[in-house]
Amino acid sequence: MLQVFPAIMLPMFISVSDQTMIAMALPAIAVDLGEADMISWTVVAYLMAAAVATPVYGRLGDLAGCKHMLSIALCIVVAGALVCCTAPNLYVLVLGRVIQGLGGGGLMALSMALVGHIIPPRERGKYQGYLAIVHLCASTLAPLIGGVITEHFGWRFLVAAAAPLAVFALIMVRRLDVVQVTYGKLGIDFPGIFLFSSFVVPFIVAMNELRTPQMDNMAAGAGCLAIAGMALLLLLRFERRALMPLFQLDVLSQPAISRSAAIAFCHGAAMMAMITLTPFYLQTEHDLTPMEIAQYLMTLTVVLALSSIATGQMVSRTGRVGIFPSLGLTLLVPIISLFAIFGTRTDAGIWLALWYAAIALCFGTVMNVLQLSVQIAAGAAHLGAAAAVLQMARTLGAAMGASAVTAVFFAIMASQGTSAEKAVLEALANASSGDTSFVHNQLTTAFQGAFFAIAIFVGIGAALAWRMPLRKLD
């Protein structure tokens, strides 16, 4: 374990912490390099590249070995970090982020695939629960580390920090003694990659555009969605006839894998929407400071990690799989719905923290079980591809969830004839004095609608979870 898990944990830590750490440096980057209106592309570029690269790594991991592909991914991360830290302008920085994304897209999927190659099925739930600690540390420590490095050493040191971590992880990965049987000849499905890129890039750009309810943005988002939809249809048609397909549809269409991917999409959408909405909600509705907001977010991440660990332990002891996400997501629907109704009436303090703890407890019952389900359904020959599809589904779901819930919030404000931006400014200005103006009540209504939208994503995931084929391990 001491030899195996550092090699798996470090790439996972780099993958999870990247977006959070770079977000802490965005203001400093904007001041240093200018082009503030394009600063969000440092995040979007990484996300698009990672989403495109993930299934490629998964497929090649099955053909060439997950250990070798993870080594290549780490090398690309190092190259991207070096480009970023020496970038003379924002365009080069975005290029460096694309390179990092091309490497980062393989870190999580290949690490999870290696767990499948090393750990017996009955024990995987327990060990994947341990891996939730990595997610916890990355989620909670990354903002603190990012803030300290940016403030005292500058943003270039922060973006370069991934390089030494990746080099150390590479050393640990190369020392792994993994015997993996590869299946099929090594080949790259370039037409499939092109069509998949033509789906992912417009889809994520559309989600980014649709966050702002302006006619130009809405038109651009709709156009991108149309391109993405057409590319997806062409991809599915091509992959059925390709000799060496990027996506082996006969494997990925298995009910255990396809439903797990659909649940991961809904879970990612709901989780990202909740994380995106929470700071905005706590600041306007409860007049909390950034440090107080961070405490609630920490409650969310800590309880989620503990729930993941407990779920993994119970799966290993009982052998039961499907019951945990089924019950967790089912309970989460009324919890979030009640939170939408009563959360704004709950004073900040222990009761509000308990709301968030209950939400996180239910969220934590899902991802470990999904990972275990797809690994067992895919078998040793397709572990990389299955893990990659699950990670890709969660990434695309996160992009859609954040955008959809934000769009619902703006739409409700617009339907009441109020500018959301002006309403937020007024709420922030008057919250400390206890103002309950009409505009503030409109904000409350919009938040309620946004939380109900999250509950819809969860409800769809719950319905799918009850139909998961794998209910118990042998």
Image: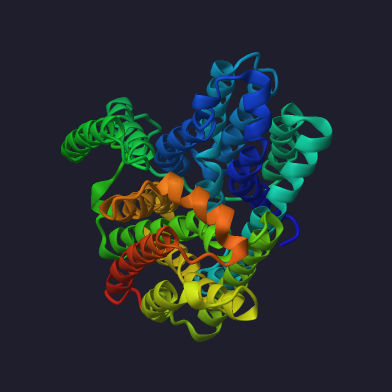
Taking the spot 63% from the left edge, 38% from the top edge, the residue there is: 22
Does residue 260 appear anywhere in the picture?
no
The N terminus - image quarter: bottom right
The outermost residue toward the right is 152
Front-lying residue, 251 or 435: 435
Q: Closer to the camera, 39 or 286?
A: 286
Left or right of 287? Residue 189 is left
**In the image, what residue occupies the spot 52% across and 47% down?**
110
Q: Which colour style is shown? A: rainbow
For the residue pair 203 and 30, the one nearer the viewer reads as 30
- Identified at 66% across, 53% down, the residue is 138
Q: Quadrant of the C terminus?
A: bottom left
Q: Residue at x 75, y 59 (%)?
A: 2
Determine which quarter of the picture holds residue 147. Answer: top right
Residue 446, image quadrant: bottom left
Q: What percent of the width, then of the height, locates residue 345?
A: 49, 77
Q: Is residue 305 above or below residue 290?
A: below
Horizontal placement of 324 versus 203: left or right? Answer: right
Let me know if residue 127 appears in the view: yes
